[in-house]
Image (cartoon, grey):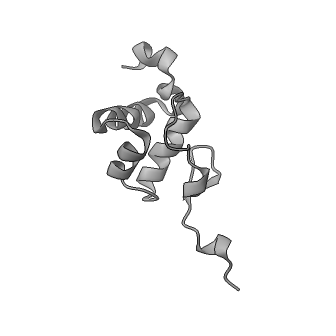
Amino acid sequence: MLTQETLRPTVVGPDGRKLTLADLPKPGIQRWVTRRKAEVVAAVRGELLTREDACRRYDISDEEFQGWERLFDRHGVKGLRTTRLQNYR
């Protein structure tokens, strides 16, 4: 039997948990911790939302999002730490 839960699109988040749109950071967020950035990157890559939708929803530029992706690809979640940004660039 199909339930509402099984119909909800999901992607695998950076920590292995399933993510839905409801699990993503709320629009208007001001404080970006590594986990939140990684969740948004995972959501876009898993086609839960488009890059354009993510940038609009979180009021970030496409260049900023691309930077998150590059750092995540090169260094994993730890690369998204703003305090470590100089070390990873």
Q: Residue at x 50, y 33 (%)?
A: 76
| Residue 75 vertical position relative to residue 62 in the rendered view, above or below | above
Residue 46 image point, x, y percent: 46, 57
Q: Residue at x 41, y 37 (%)?
A: 73
Considering every residue shown, the one lying at the far bottom of the view is 1
Which quadrant does the C terminus fall into?
A: top left
Considering every residue shown, the one lying at the far front of the view is 28
Near-viewer residue (74 or 70): 70
Residue 87 image point, x, y percent: 43, 14
Near-viewer residue (59 or 21): 59
Q: Residue at x 48, y 28 (%)?
A: 80
Near-viewer residue (15 or 9): 9
| Residue 10 vertical position relative to residue 77 in the rendered view, above or below | below
> In this rendering, would 52 be left or right of 38?
left
Residue 60 image point, x, y percent: 37, 36
Q: Residue at x 67, y 82 (%)?
A: 2
Residue 58 image point, x, y percent: 43, 40
Quadrant in the rendering for residue 63:
top left
> In this rendering, would 65 be left or right of 79?
left
